[in-house]
């Protein structure tokens, strides 16, 4: 069993990380995921002021995919007290803002409470707070640089909704990022033929789950080749075999989101399969598909 690994400057209990947005809204739920085998956890994205989120329906579940437009609901600085029950645990704060100053302000609330940050510059339906930043390499660089001033490791979560994800990754690296995370959700929609209207209140949203795994894998593969900082894989991972595939493409660690909604013991299940006694060390296969 491999424990205590470091990826992107952050010490974690294993290679499997709870992705942002899933069960990350309370200290108790984050703690439960750590007890259930997650090597680290990422919080729900926290921004500069409290936000209620988009009007519903906010989630639409399909076979092998989930469509969401939650709308960045979060309690802003009131969230910090949730971290009191997670002292010295491997917690990463997902944060967002409209510009570099807002990113730095939100990050400053978390100093001394978390091991590092994940910058959310990639929500596909965030109106000024998300992919508008992630699609602009100059802004990605400035926001990364602003949060790097905290001295803590900064991961940048990238959007797949661009022509060339390498450009955003290179901008994050230049801004001082310790790692990039690929990918956030893929911009998508469904229409109810009965109701003759889109299934989501926000009309469009972000697709996650097994359906986007091949897109995420391709992004990790391209980023690993283009960057000198670690790549964290995220997008539709639901088995140990998916984790190994992500690592072969170049992922140093892997985030798991939608699969947690299907079974909350997913971390124990995947860790059990991944760290079998006989098996190769997981870290020895990173990037082997490039050789
Ligand atoms: O809250 C959301 O609607 C949301 C966010 Br912040 C994100 O980054 N990605 C996503 O699919 N949904």
Image (spheres, grey):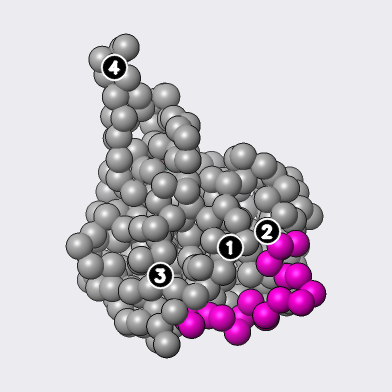
Q: Earlier in the sequence, mark 1 or mark 3?
A: 3
Residue name at image x 60 percent, y 40 percent: 261
Q: Position of residue 178 (x, y in %)?
A: 47, 79
Judging by the rendered image, the residue that carries numbered circle 1 is 241
Q: Position of residue 201 (x, y in %)?
A: 35, 25
Residue name at image x 39 percent, y 58 percent: 214
Residue 191 in which image quadrant: top left
Q: Residue furthest top?
A: 194
Find out whether residue 276 is within the magenta segment: yes
Judging by the rendered image, the residue that carries numbered circle 3 is 220
Q: Is residue 145 visible?
A: no
State which mark lies toward you, 1 or 4.
1
SS for tag 4? loop
Q: Earlier in the sequence, mark 1 or mark 4?
A: 4
Residue name at image x 42 percent, y 47 percent: 211
Disc 1 and disc 4: Cα gap in Å? 36 Å
Assess disc 2: are there few (<14), some (14-19) or many (≥20) residues with their C-alpha within 10 Å of its C-alpha: many
The N terminus appears in which quarter of the rendering? bottom right
Q: Is residue 247 visible?
A: yes
Magenta residues span 271-288
Assess disc 3: are there few (<14), some (14-19) or many (≥20) residues with their C-alpha within 10 Å of its C-alpha: many
Judging by the rendered image, the residue that carries numbered circle 4 is 193
Q: Residue furthest front?
A: 278
- On whether ligand 1 comes within 8 Å of the CB at mark 4, the answer is no
Residue name at image x 30 percent, y 45 percent: 187
Q: Where is 267 relative to 169, above or below?
A: above
Judging by the rendered image, the residue that carries numbered circle 2 is 270
Q: Where is 16 relative to 256, above or below?
A: below
Q: Nearer the viewer, residue 287 or 24?
A: 287
Q: Position of residue 88 (x, y in %)?
A: 74, 67
């Amino acid at each position: 069993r491999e424990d205590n690994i470091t990826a992107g400057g952050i010490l974690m209990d294993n290679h499997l990380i709870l992705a942002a947005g899933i069960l990350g809204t309370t200290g108790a739920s984050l703690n439960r995921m750590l007890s259930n085998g997650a090597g680290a956890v990422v919080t729900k994205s926290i921004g500069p002021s409290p936000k209620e989120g988009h009007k519903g329906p906010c989630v639409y579940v399909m076979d092998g995919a989930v469509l969401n437009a939650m709308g960045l609901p979060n309690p802003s600085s009131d969230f910090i007290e949730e971290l009191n029950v997670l002292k010295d645990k491997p917690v990463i704060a997902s944060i967002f803002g409209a510009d570099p100053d807002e990113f730095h302000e939100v990050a400053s609330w978390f100093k001394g409470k978390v091991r590092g940050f994940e910058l959310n510059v990639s929500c596909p339906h965030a109106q000024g707070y998300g992919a508008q930043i992630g699609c602009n390499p100059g802004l990605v660089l400035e926001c990364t640089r602003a949060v790097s001033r905290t001295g803590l490791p900064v991961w940048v979560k990238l959007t797949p909704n661009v022509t060339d994800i390498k450009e955003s990754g290179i901008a994050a690296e230049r801004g001082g990022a310790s790692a990039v995370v690929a990918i956030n959700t893929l911009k998508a929609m469904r229409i109810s033929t009965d109701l003759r209207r889109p299934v989501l209140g926000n009309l469009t949203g972000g697709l996650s789950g097994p359906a986007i795994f091949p897109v995420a894998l391709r992004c990790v593969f391209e980023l690993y080749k283009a960057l000198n900082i670690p790549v964290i894989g995220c997008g539709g991972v639901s088995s140990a075999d998916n984790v190994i595939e992500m690592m072969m493409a170049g992922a140093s660690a892997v985030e798991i989101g939608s699969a947690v909604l299907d079974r909350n013991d997913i971390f124990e299940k995947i860790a059990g399969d991944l760290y079998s006694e006989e098996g190769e060390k997981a870290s020895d296969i990173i990037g082997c598909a490039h050789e």
